[in-house]
Amino acid sequence: MGKKRNAPLNKVFAWVRRQSTKVKTAMAAAAVLFSLVALKLLIHDHNHFFVASEAIHFTGILVLIYKLSTQKTCSGLSLRSQELTAIFLAARLMCSLFMEGDIHTFLDFVTLVSTLWVIYMMRIKLRSTYVEELDNLPLHYVAAPCVILALLIHPYTHHMRIGRMLWAFGVYLESVSVLPQLRMMQNTKMIEPFTAHYVFALGVARFLGCAHWIIRVYESGGSYLFLVGTGYFWLPTVLIAEIVQTFILADFCYYYVKSVMNGQLIMSLPLPV
């Protein structure tokens, strides 16, 4: 029954694979444009984009907690990505506490606590199941450029400068924090379901964040990027950071959807992500 039910979808994926790179790119662009238009029409409060993004990220962490609690293994998970996640969440939480406390502060707090629990399990309880040699992307390769960029480009507001730079650092680090996880999956080639669910949740979360900025820029006719008081390079750089992370995760999300539609529990990556 499952094969019959998924047969049309299999044909669609097979047809897509046969298309040229230009056609695939055009179809992907059309899908993104359709999604952006749908989000703009359905969601009027732009703040809901970030709330949904943070909630989906937290849901992804809960998936990891379930995996670690039930399967007693952290195989396939990147400890380095979790540590980078904890760092940018801590930076963002500190800024939120000094600037303003709201639903974002609460979501960042619960996500940070959950991420720290995942790190504890990977470092202590389930250390024997962690494959460190496959998690081989050095943290300073990811974090150092974010520090330099935050020192050079950050928002100009009435808040303390160190707080503004810390906020910028968190934004930049979030955009590349998934790179060690993607490198590890590229090394292993095969991805078990819970890790795939988690990374897909990150992809959806980042798309919503990116959609927020794109829609704001569109509605303002581009002027939103250069608001007085924010620094002329800050908002364009934030938008670029959001687009970079969305692009990084887009290829993985394609293979994830393909595997789910085909009813596969174990996901494979025939091409590097």
Image (tube, rainbow, N blue to C red):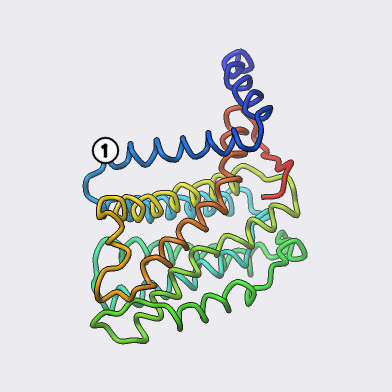
Left or right of residue 52: residue 191: right
Q: Is residue 196 depicted above or below 135 in this figure? A: above
State the residue at coordinates (75%, 61%).
134
Q: Nearer the viewer, residue 78 or 211?
A: 211
Q: 87 or 230: nearer the eye?
A: 230
Residue at 67%, 39% in the rendered image: 267
The disc labelled 1 sits on which kind of residue?
Leu
Q: Are there few (<14), some (14-19), or many (20+) residues within 10 Å of tag 1? A: few
Say which element carries label 1: helix
Residue at 52% across, 75% down: 146
Residue 144: x and y in percent read 58, 79
Location of residue 232 in the rendering, given as x and y in whole percent from the top left corner = 34, 73
The residue furthest right is: 133
The residue wearing badge 1 is 42
Percent position of residue 174, x then y = 48, 65
On the image, the x and y values in percent for residue 272 come to 71, 49
| Quadrant where the image shows the N terminus | top right
Residue 216: quarter of image: bottom left
Q: Quadrant of residue 16?
A: top right
